[in-house]
Image (cartoon, rainbow, N blue to C red):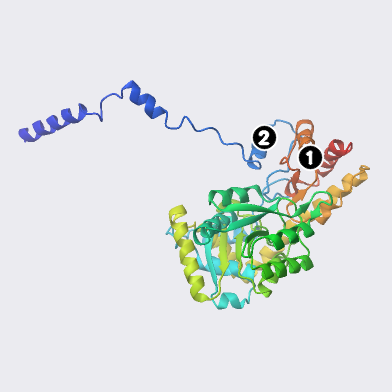
Amino acid sequence: MAALRAASSNITRRISGSSIYSKTRPSEARWMSSWWNHVTPAPKDPILGVTEAFLADSSPNKVNVGVGAYRDDNGKPVVLDCVREAEARIAGNLNMEYLPMGGSNHMVEETLKLAYGDSSELIKDKRIAAVQALSGTGACRLFADFQKRYKPESEIYIPIPTWSNHHNIWRDAQVSQKLYHYYHPESRGLDFSGMMNDIKNAPKGSFFLLHACAHNPTGVDPTEEEWKEISQLMKEKGHFPFFDMAYQGFASGDPERDAKAIRIFLQDGHLLGVSQSFAKNMGLYGQRVGCLSVLCENEQEALSVKTRMQQIARPMYSNPPVHGALLVSIILSDPNLKNLWLKEVKVMADRIIGMRTALRENLEKLGSSLSWEHITKQIGMFCYSGMTKDQVHRLTSEFHIYMTDNGRISMAGVTTKNVEYIANAIHEVTKSS
């Protein structure tokens, strides 16, 4: 025993005298501390930075119409009753096991019905490769990586303008980007001829990012007839349409109507991809629940594509979270809860539409010489106001109204209590235009 203690003491002395315990020499310390000194602060996110500035403002009159999260008429976040009921059903009954890499099969099946139709033969024929994703952002990123891996020579055509994170997603996936015309600043509507020309002139087999409804940030959507023309031209050119559908149900209040663009493309025989999110239409912002789907030629191809999408997800995040997926699958599969959700999503959409009308009416009552009809012609959460960066900065500095520099107003931040104040402020900064 004494010999063992002596040996142990000897080992301790040798270790304590080694480099593990010895003091780092000054030159080594300088080298180690310089690992990250070349890293500079990232620029503020153009959307999330608005909220940071808003929170730092002490004015009692401050208004945030920058971030796209739904608020009720009191400016408060909303948890839908259908979500509360689904929460009650799973309370205490939820195990914490991993989901498969592809996520909840039940949630995915119910989600596909929203995009492709309840009785879609494509679902029955198992031609759709689909996985649960980390909301719409995660679905887009997963597809961008899939595109880079299996169509490495391809580019993605992105509308001018688009949600700013779209550029980040495809850039970080190392997919080359090209732009296509979409918004017409003078009319504050769709640049349909410019869009069609760009689709026509793009090389055959190009990838196009399309907003299925409630285009972010403009709120400008093609009409049904325009969607039909877009679909026919893209079919002739052999382009691949990828739909980002972040606002199904939230745009018009009717999920079927908001999926019309996708249904038109399906009727025309396109193979396509879809990103879906439940952040906006179920208020599940923090749960990060979404779905990525790719329509394939046949069941075997769909199986191959799905396994490859799962393979890409594995080193990214391994598998998606379970809680939000359970909420969505319960709500969509229970007829009573689904009907309740349909009523609640319509209430949200109708409030946004009502605030558009109120904002336009207040501006027109002030005698503005500008036309504000685009406020009610646009749809969804965002209004592309047409205000300049300088005018937006005046709104912030003089009236404590916060929005992104491009003049995008989140209509969810407009309420019956502040709409008159917002209209007066907009009138003040635009009346000399």
Compared to 96, does 369 lie above or below? above
Question: Tag 1: residue type?
Answer: Thr
Compared to 179, does 242 lie above or below? below
Determine crowd level at label 2: few under 14, some 14-19, many 20+ residues with C-alpha closer than 10 A: few
In the rendered image, residue 153, in percent from the top left (x then y), is placed at: 54, 58
Label 1's element? Answer: loop
What label does residue 53 carry, if any? 2
Q: Is residue 197 left or right of residue 18?
A: right
* The N terminus - image quarter: top left
Question: Tag 2: residue type?
Answer: Ala
Front position in the image: 426 or 346 = 426
What label does residue 290 carry, if any? none
| Viewer can see residue 330 | yes
Which residue has dot 1 on it? 388
In the rendered image, residue 417, in percent from the top left (x then y), is placed at: 80, 43
Q: How many marks?
A: 2
Residue 270: name its quadrant.
bottom right
Question: Which residue is at 55% across, 56% downward?
Answer: 144
Which of the two discs, 2 and 1, labels the residue nearer the N terminus?
A: 2
Front position in the image: 376 or 9 = 376
Front position in the image: 95 or 163 = 163
* The C terminus - image quarter: top right
